[in-house]
Amino acid sequence: MKMAECTGMRRRDFLSSASLLVIGAATVKASPFSSQSAIKGPDLPEMLSAAEAESVKDSIMATDMSNFWGKGYSCAETGFAVALRFMEKPEDLVAVAGGFGGGMMHQDLCGFLTAGIMAIGLQTGSMGVEKNVAKERCSRLVNDYWDWWVSNAPLHCSDIREGREDFKVCHRLGQLAAVRLERLLKT
């Protein structure tokens, strides 16, 4: 019995499928969901540089973090809460971010990253424009925020906090993320 008869697949179909599998694997590897910053936890600074401190001082959202950070709110709740206040949205919506803190409670994607993406979605979804216009804007802003993030920090909470007992690095990243998100929400 020939191989094609056993599998029910013609050789041409198999080769086409194999090519798609290789392309798919390369695409997943290049996907933003698999990319990581070269900066790992131990190499991430815990304190703001002078330039970073100046940008934080000038940011409404970054300075508002002091109202939430360290007061029972997770990273995601803090990031989303300051975005809600900045966008003048009901603050009780912060409950949406409850499951995203601590890397979705599993040391996965950083809560400040996911909070920013939620805020962008909320803002673009409530613009009062056609759905396709809102989706295009959302996509553009999320890609910008994502690219900024991966150039500054790892995606995952476990990599950010690697070897640390405190949350200083998280506080710094949260402030910087708030600065970046505020700029994006203003555009």
Image (tube, rainbow, N blue to C red):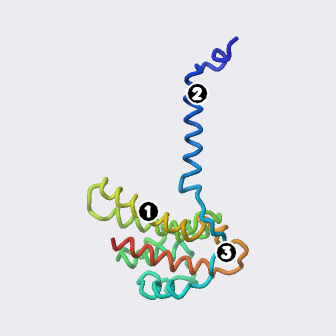
- Judging by the rendered image, the residue that carries numbered circle 2 is 15
How far, Cα to Cα, is label 1 from label 3?
A: 26 Å
Q: x and y percent of residue 101 in the render? A: 58, 70
Q: Which residue is mark 1?
A: 142
Toward the top, the furthest residue is 1
Q: Residue at x 32, y 64 (%)?
A: 126
User: Badge 2: few (under 14), some or many (20 or more) residues near its Cα, within 10 Å?
Assistant: few
Q: Amino acid at mark 2?
A: Leu
- Please tell me which residue lies in front, 106 or 30: 30
Left or right: 76, with 144 as reference point? right
Q: Which marked residue is nearer to the observer: mark 2 or mark 1?
A: 2
Element under disc 3: helix
Dividing the picture into quadrants, the one containing residue 87 is bottom left
Q: Quadrant of the C terminus?
A: bottom left
Amino acid at dot 3: Asp
| Left or right: where 97 falls relative to 83 | right
Residue 119 to residue 35: above or below: below
Q: Earlier in the sequence, mark 2 or mark 1?
A: 2
Residue that carries the numbered disc 3 in the rendered image: 43
